[in-house]
């Protein structure tokens, strides 16, 4: 039986991009369904009744929610191609640890830069850059967080790079100036078809964030 | 090579407690190191430089941090008596609900603490109401799920052992929060933790824990 894969997603979503990257890494065909987050579809509400959020992967009718859980699911089901998590349990634990930490911190840190001004924004920028530097330390001299291979932490983090232009623009700072290694890493990731075809163009992300700023009354 | 397993924990923490449960279920021998969170050991700071928190599992010198990450590591390293389902979809569901429970606990516990340390009746009632609101979400979501009510302790149930701390707080305050009437599924689960030989391993040393909270939080309330 052919696999039926549907992705309920929203183009500018960092979390959705992770799934698009993972599916592309595995060479999987799927149906992409863009969701209106201000007018949620009955299907979305049915498939994710707990959180009512995207992304949701629907595999042969069964929904899986929460982006890091979905990526692990994809990796486990289609395990013969491009493994994202390492085989060794300790290395896997480290990958999960960093993906978990990125999840807990980075989205909010970035979002706060775009929704604040003045001194508060300066604090947010500092915190954001500190976190990126911590990640740079973890990357070290490796080409990817997964080592020689593009892996789970790379998938978890790379989508944020689509938002860097927006953060820099609204925060009036340069990420590359402070974190050159990390920017080099994002460029390396973008050389992969799976990443370049999955991430939304930074200008479009910027325009989306501009819209959100107007919506929140920051502009 | 002989295994060397160490667990840095805190006896009052449900997060390190559930790691102990996982290790015991797997029959893994370990050295337990009690941490003073107001005076963290150099070892802990070395093993968990990012968060500086317990629990941390150190296996043959290599540290793993974050409670749910540790539990998965234990399950993958000692493969007998599996905690997580084998099927990827069931596994995804188990991960989802464990995360959900953890997230809800961080809404429930502050409300419970607020009630325990309250200066007055009104504040205490507010804390209890808030806790019950989040408990209700848990109750609604969990009551139809099949991993509650199984014979063996699985990933979700071990994660849910956090709920016992709410029951402890009831004894501290002399107030019922997790009533059978309002929360039949959760109440049934907590009974299982108290009655069942296997589930009992999740339960902390009861009297000392109640006494600890009474002391600590009574002092806090008195200082307000």
Image: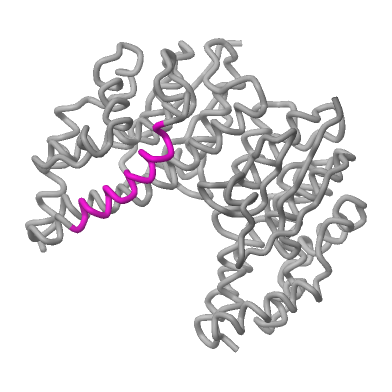
Q: Quadrant of residue A199?
A: bottom right
B105 horizontally vs A146: left or right:
left
For the question of whether residue A85 can be seen, the reply is no
What percent of the width, then of the height, locates residue A153?
71, 46
Q: Is residue B86 above or below residue A94?
A: above
Total labels: the figure holds 0
> Does the segment drawn in magenta span residue B136?
yes
Residue range highlighted in magenta: B126-143
Above or below for A122 versus A178: below
Q: Tell me the chief SS of the magenta region.
A: helix
If the image is split into quadrants, where does the N terminus of chain A sit? top right
Image point 90% across, 40% down: which residue? A27
Front position in the image: A187 or B115: B115
The quadrant of the picture occupied by the C terminus of chain A is bottom right
Query: In x, y percent, where is residue A156?
Result: 70, 50
Residue nearer the viewer, A109 or A45: A45
Horizontal relation, residue B19 to residue A55: left or right: left
Q: Determine the residue positioned at 31% across, 35% down.
A: B163
Residue A87: in magenta span: no
Residue A71 position by quadrant: top right
For the view shown, which residue lies furthest in the front direction? A42
Is residue A55 shown left or right of residue A120?
A: right
State the residue at coordinates (18%, 53%): B115
Query: Seen in the image, is B14 located left or right of residue A167?
Result: left
Q: Position of residue A11 (x, y in %)?
A: 76, 62
At x 20% / y 51%, what residue is drawn?
B128
* Residue A153 makes an appearance in the image: yes
Which sits in the foreground, B181 or B64? B181
Picture coordinates of residue A165 (x, y %)?
A: 76, 75
């Amino acid at each position: 039986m052919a696999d039926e894969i549907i992705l309920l997603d929203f183009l500018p979503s960092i979390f959705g991009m992770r799934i698009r990257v993972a599916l592309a890494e595995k060479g999987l065909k799927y149906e992409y369904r863009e969701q209106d987050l201000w007018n949620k579809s009955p299907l979305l509400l049915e498939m994710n009744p707990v959180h009512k959020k995207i992304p949701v992967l629907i595999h042969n009718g069964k929904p899986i929610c929460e982006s890091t859980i979905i990526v692990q699911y994809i990796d486990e089901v289609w395990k013969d191609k491009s493994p994202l998590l390492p085989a060794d349990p300790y290395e896997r634990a480290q990958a999960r640890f960093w993906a978990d930490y990125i999840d807990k911190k980075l989205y909010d840190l970035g979002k706060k830069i775009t929704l604040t001004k003045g001194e508060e924004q300066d604090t947010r920028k500092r915190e954001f850059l500190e976190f990126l530097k911590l990640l740079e330390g973890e990357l070290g001299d490796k080409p990817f967080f997964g080592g020689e291979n593009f892996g789970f932490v790379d998938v978890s983090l790379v989508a944020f790079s689509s938002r860097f232009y927006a953060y820099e623009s609204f925060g009036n700072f340069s990420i590359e100036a402070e974190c050159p290694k990390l920017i080099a890493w994002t460029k390396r990731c973008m050389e992969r078809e799976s990443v370049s075809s999955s991430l939304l163009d930074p200008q479009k992300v910027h325009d989306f964030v501009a819209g959100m700023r107007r919506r929140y009354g920051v502009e | 090579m002989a295994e060397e397993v160490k667990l840095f924990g805190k006896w009052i923490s449900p997060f390190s407690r559930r790691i102990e449960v996982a290790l015991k279920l797997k029959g893994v021998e370990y050295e337990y190191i009690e941490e003073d969170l107001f005076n963290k050991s150099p070892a802990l700071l070395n093993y968990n430089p990012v968060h500086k928190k317990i629990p941390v599992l150190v296996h043959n010198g290599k540290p793993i941090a974050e409670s749910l990450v540790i539990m998965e590591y234990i399950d993958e390293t000692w493969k007998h008596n599996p905690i997580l389902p084998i099927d990827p979809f069931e596994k995804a569901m188990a991960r989802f609900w464990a995360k959900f429970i953890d997230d809800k606990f961080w809404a429930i516990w502050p409300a419970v603490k607020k009630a325990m340390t309250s200066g007055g009746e009104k504040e205490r009632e507010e804390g209890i109401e808030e806790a019950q609101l989040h408990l209700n979400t848990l109750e609604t979501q969990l009551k139809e799920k099949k991993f509650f009510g199984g014979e063996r302790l699985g990933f979700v149930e071990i994660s849910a052992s956090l709920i016992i701390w709410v029951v402890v707080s009831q004894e501290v305050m002399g107030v019922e929060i997790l009533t059978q009437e309002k929360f039949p599924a959760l109440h049934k689960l907590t009974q299982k933790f108290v009655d069942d030989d296997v589930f009992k391993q999740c339960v902390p040393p009861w009297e000392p824990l109640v006494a600890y909270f009474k002391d600590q939080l009574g002092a806090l309330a008195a200082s307000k």
